[in-house]
Image (tube, rainbow, N blue to C red):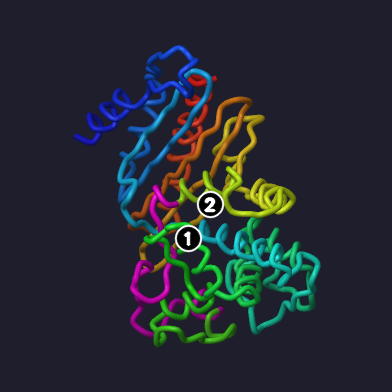
């Protein structure tokens, strides 16, 4: 039933011309169809949304596009957006110096976990997106304020998107601490290494989580990159430059294609999540995309699923370019 649904969706939506002056034609690409069916057939809960347009028409592929799903660090794009909005308002700066120490340190911080001192805000934001550094994330969200990030999300109509107060508070909550409690760096570090000492909570919970939908993530990137968020072109340029640095983008985008986005993942209490939202551009073809999968398993299973999804997702995007360009 799942395979037939995708094929029907493709057949129904692959033909609309971009403007009345273009000849209407049907995009019928078996490889694109097969890549989509492979992705949504992965173990666990999957969600997929692709909306693309080019000289030959439009493509829309959807599977559970409005279903809430854990997206992990993909929410960090909202922190970047909120920071840059504050820069435009004159309340924050990309040059200001931010403190790196144990008050904001968080696990899974490739850049800052072992460092103490200061760093310019621009470097902090780059570390947050490029290397998904959680210490950088908490430095940024503490400075801009989680309320400001949530206000931005709400202003874009993203009613199913949820972010934590910080990654460390989320880890504390997942580890069984009272909701909203920050257990501190030492306790959270020990929990990350040895497991929680209290009954753990699920990654998707009512208190502190990282959840969105394919529809909302596609709308976010389409709106921001389409010029609908920032008042000044140079602010959008800064957003694009930093989002281009995310290490997940070259892994899934076709070669020599511009891609903006931020992936996310988690490994927690036999729960795994992988998410890759963003936008790619190649000449006249533009595609906004989202894929996520939540599934049970350990880190070894997460590595296997990562390898299984990378090829089909890249094939989906590559065939989209070939079909529309």
Residue 77 relative to residue 119: left or right:
left
Residue 214 relative to residue 6: left or right:
right
Quadrant housing the C terminus? top right
> CB under 8 Å between callouts 1 and 2?
yes
Residue at 30% in and 50% down: 44
Residue 151: image x %, image y %?
Answer: 50, 68
The answer for how far apart the CA atoms under marks 1 and 2 are is 8 Å
Whichever of labels 1 and 2 marks the residue nearer the N terminus, that label is 1
Considering every residue shown, the one lying at the far left of the view is: 1
Q: Nearer the viewer, residue 216 or 258?
A: 216
Residue 284: image x %, image y %?
Answer: 60, 25
Residue at 50% in and 21% down: 324
Where are the magenta residues, as a range?
Answer: 189-216
Q: Nearer the viewer, residue 31 or 221?
A: 221
The label shown at residue 129 is none
Residue 205: image x %, image y %?
Answer: 34, 71
Residue at 38% in and 76% down: 207
Q: Is residue 233 above or below residue 124?
A: above
Q: Secondary structure at mark 1?
A: helix
Q: Is residue 214 above or below residue 76?
A: above
> Is residue 127 rendered magenta in the image?
no
How many C-alpha atoms fall within 10 Å of the one at disc 2: few (<14), some, or many (≥20)? many
Residue at 52% in and 44% down: 222
Q: Which residue is mark 1?
A: 72
Q: Nearer the viewer, residue 58 or 32?
A: 58
Residue 48: image x %, image y %?
Answer: 38, 42
Q: Which residue is mark 2?
A: 263
Magenta span: predominant SS is loop
Q: Secondary structure at mark 2?
A: loop
């Amino acid at each position: 039933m799942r395979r037939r649904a995708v094929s029907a969706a493709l057949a129904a939506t692959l033909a609309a011309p971009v403007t009345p002056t273009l000849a209407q034609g049907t995009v019928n690409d078996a490889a694109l169809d097969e890549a989509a069916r492979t992705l949504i057939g992965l173990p666990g809960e999957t969600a997929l949304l692709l909306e693309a347009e080019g000289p030959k028409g439009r493509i829309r592929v959807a599977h559970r596009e409005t279903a809430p799903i854990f997206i992990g660090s993909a929410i960090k794009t909202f922190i970047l957006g909120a920071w840059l909005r504050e820069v435009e308002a004159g309340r924050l700066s990309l040059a200001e110096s931010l403190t790196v120490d144990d008050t904001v340190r968080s696990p899974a911080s490739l850049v800052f976990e072992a460092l103490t001192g200061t760093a310019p805000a621009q470097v902090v934001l780059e570390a947050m997106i490029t290397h998904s550094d959680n210490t950088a994330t908490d430095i940024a969200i503490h400075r801009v304020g989680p309320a400001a990030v949530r206000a931005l999300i709400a202003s874009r109509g993203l009613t199913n998107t949820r972010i934590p107060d910080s990654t460390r508070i989320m880890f504390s909550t997942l580890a069984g601490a009272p909701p909203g409690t920050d257990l501190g760096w030492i306790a959270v570090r020990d929990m990350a290494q040895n497991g929680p000492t209290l009954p753990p909570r699920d990654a998707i919970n009512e208190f502190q989580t990282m959840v969105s939908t394919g529809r909302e993530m596609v709308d976010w990137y389409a709106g921001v990159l389409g010029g609908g968020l920032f008042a000044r072109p140079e602010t959008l340029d800064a957003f694009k430059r930093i989002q281009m640095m995310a290490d997940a983008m070259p892994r899934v985008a076709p070669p020599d294609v511009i891609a903006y986005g931020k992936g996310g993942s988690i490994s927690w209490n036999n729960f795994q999540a992988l998410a890759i939202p963003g936008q790619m551009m190649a000449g006249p073809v533009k595609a906004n995309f989202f894929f996520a999968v939540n599934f049970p398993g350990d880190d070894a299973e997460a590595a296997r699923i990562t390898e299984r999804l990378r090829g089909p997702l890249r094939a989906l995007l590559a065939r989209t370019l070939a079909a529309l360009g």
